[in-house]
Amino acid sequence: MNLQSEQQAKETGMQVSLKEAKKILTPQRRGFLAAGPYPYTHSLSAYVGCGFGQTTCGLYCYAQFLPNWTFGTGGAAWGKAVQVKTNAADLLAHELARMPAQERQKLRIFMSSTTDPYQPTEHSYRATRRCIEIFSAYPELDLLVIQTRSPLARRDLPLLTQIPYAYLSVTIETDDQAYLKKMQGGPLLEQRWELVRMASELGIATQITVSPCLAYTDVAIFGQRLLTSGAQRIVVDTVVDGDGSHGSRTARSPFARVEPAWDTTIPAHLLYNYLTEHAPAQHIELGWSVAGFCGIAPRAQRAL
């Protein structure tokens, strides 16, 4: 660990370690991202572990159960350690450069499936930023979805305008800040709404993922705010539909211990039904769970 890492660890209680990865683009052959109707070809994670793991999303995040976390970080608690893939951008540049152009045109990349690309560690290490800079040099890819709940993504909005196939996907799982605070908090909801607005106004394709749908104030209030947010797509999900094991992973998660109604999907369905009724008038694309996440059509169709 370098001096910068040591200082950050002292200030935040986060264990930050540096590593060199062997590959950065992970093929998706099965599972959530490989589902239809429009599956992803690869995922990209510039970090192992997530600095948001001690906030609300860390309660239900499935990544805490994966082998690369369970066995790869020395037994640290979820959300208390992060590994930075220091060569992520170099690997990405190498992997893209060696692909024929026709192969690059088929790439549909989800960033990131097991960590937030704009978690607090990104402030210092900028591994995500450097990867996005590489993407900006390749205009021909099919899709890059950057999934985050972090207002830090505002820093890179000017860069994202240079990537015609990029989608900024922002998690807004509730409109109830008090409920979020009652759990374990997280990035302020107002700052996430503002991130969506700013990205949309800059012409960046923008998606909101209500994933998982947590308790909210009122279906019409939340629904209307989603519809008027500026997002072109909205995806609604639950911890039962979206955890990859029909809820069994969530059942043993900390979220199930602190939220008695963790497996109740009625609020999510009510919200989805409300959006289904009103989204067409707003020309907003709507998706449910896996099919929603994998519902962005190929670039050639999006251009029509």
Image (cartoon, rainbow, N blue to C red):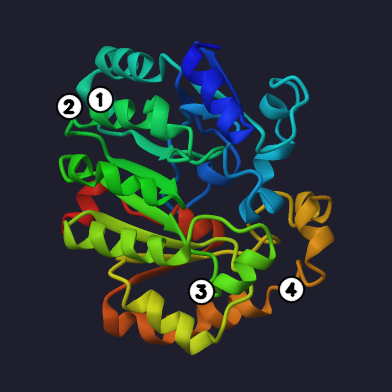
The answer to the question of whether label 3 and label 1 lie on touching residues, with beta carbons closer than 8 A, is no
Q: Is residue 181 left or right of residue 40?
A: right
> Type of residue at label 1?
Ile
Q: Which of pointers 4 and 3 lies earlier in the amino acid sequence?
A: 3
Q: Depth check: 280 or 263 in front? A: 263
Label 1 neighbour load within 10 Å: few <14, some 14-19, many 20+ = some
Distance of mark 3 from mark 1, alpha carbons? 35 Å
Distance of mark 4 from mark 3, alpha carbons? 18 Å
Q: Which residue is mark 3?
A: 175
Q: Helix, strand, or loop for circle 2?
A: loop
> Type of residue at label 3?
Asp
The answer to the question of whether label 2 and label 1 lie on touching residues, with beta carbons closer than 8 A, is yes
The image shows residue 186, relative to residue 7, as above or below, that is below
The answer to the question of whether label 2 and label 3 lie on touching residues, with beta carbons closer than 8 A, is no
Q: Which residue is mark 2?
A: 137
The image shows residue 147, relative to residue 90, as above or below, that is below
Distance of mark 2 from mark 4, alpha carbons? 45 Å
Q: Give me the disc on residue 12.
A: none
Q: Nearer the viewer, mark 4 or mark 3?
A: 3
Q: Nearer the viewer, mark 3 or mark 1?
A: 3
